[in-house]
Amino acid sequence: MSYTKQVVQFISESLLQIQRKPDNKYESEPELQELVKYWMPSGSGIDAGTRLDFNKSKPNKLIFNFDYHHMDQNGFYCGWSYHSLIVTPDFDGFDMRIIGQHPSRRKWQTEHFHEYLYQTYYFALRREYKYDVDLTRKLRVYTCVEFPHMQVSIPAHWLYTKPCEQQQS
C-alpha cells in the first residue's frame, strides 16, 4: 500500500481518524506530533519549532503555534513573538492566516516578515510525501517526493497489536 499526498492532507486526514476513533487518540496523537515536528519549519527564526494545537484543530481547520526569534539591525537577538497559523481548505488547495504581532513598528519589516512566514509555511504544507508500510521492520515510512533522502520512519503500532482471543463458549 503506497500513496502520495501533501503534508496538509496527511495532517487533516490523521485528525479525522482521531476524531472517528477517540480510543486510538493516545496512540495517534504522538505519531502525528512527531510527523509535524519533522515536516513543519524549525530554525531560521522559528527556533522553537512548530506545534499542532490538538485542542483547537479539526480536520477542516488546522491550527499550528510557533514562536519567532527576532534579530535587530546589528544581528543580535532582540525578542520573541508568538504566532498561530490557521489553515483551512479552499477551492485551490488551502488558505492560510497568521495571527500574532511583530515587535517592530516599522511597516517594511512587518511586511517582509509576514511574507517570509507565509512562504515558509506554504511550501512546507504543499510538500508531497509518499506513504509506505515496511512490514519487515514494522514501520510507517514517509518519503519526500521532491527530496527522496528526506525520510521519516515511525513505528506502526497497529502492527504490534495481538489478535483478539476467541471467546470460548
Image: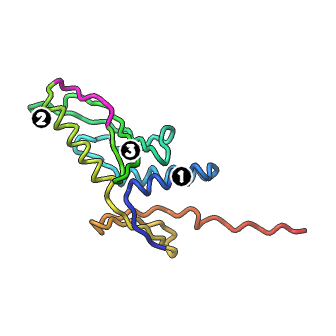
Q: Residues within 10 Å of mark 2 (few under 14, many from 20)?
A: few
Q: Is residue 115 above or below residue 2?
A: above
Q: Which residue is mark 3?
A: 87
The picture places residue 37, in percent across and down from the top left corner, at 38, 50
Q: Give the mark nearer the N terminus: 1 vs 2.
A: 1
- 138 to the left or right of 50: right
Q: Residues within 10 Å of mark 3 (few under 14, many from 20)?
A: many
Q: Residue drawn at (35%, 65%), measured in percent from left and top? A: 151
163 drawn magenta = no
Amino acid on which disc 1 is placed: Leu
Q: Which residue is mark 1?
A: 16
Q: Residue drawn at (52%, 69%), measured in percent from left and top? A: 138
Of residue 119 and residue 38, the one placed in the foreground of this image is 119
The picture places residue 28, in percent across and down from the top left corner, at 54, 53
Q: Please identify the residue farthest to the front as the structure is shown.
A: 91
Residue at disc 1, secondary structure: helix
Q: Which portion, as a residue range, is magenta? A: 98-105
Indicate which disc residue 75 carries: 2
2 or 3: mark nearer the eye? 3
Residue at disc 2, secondary structure: loop
Q: CA distance from mark 1 to mark 3?
A: 15 Å
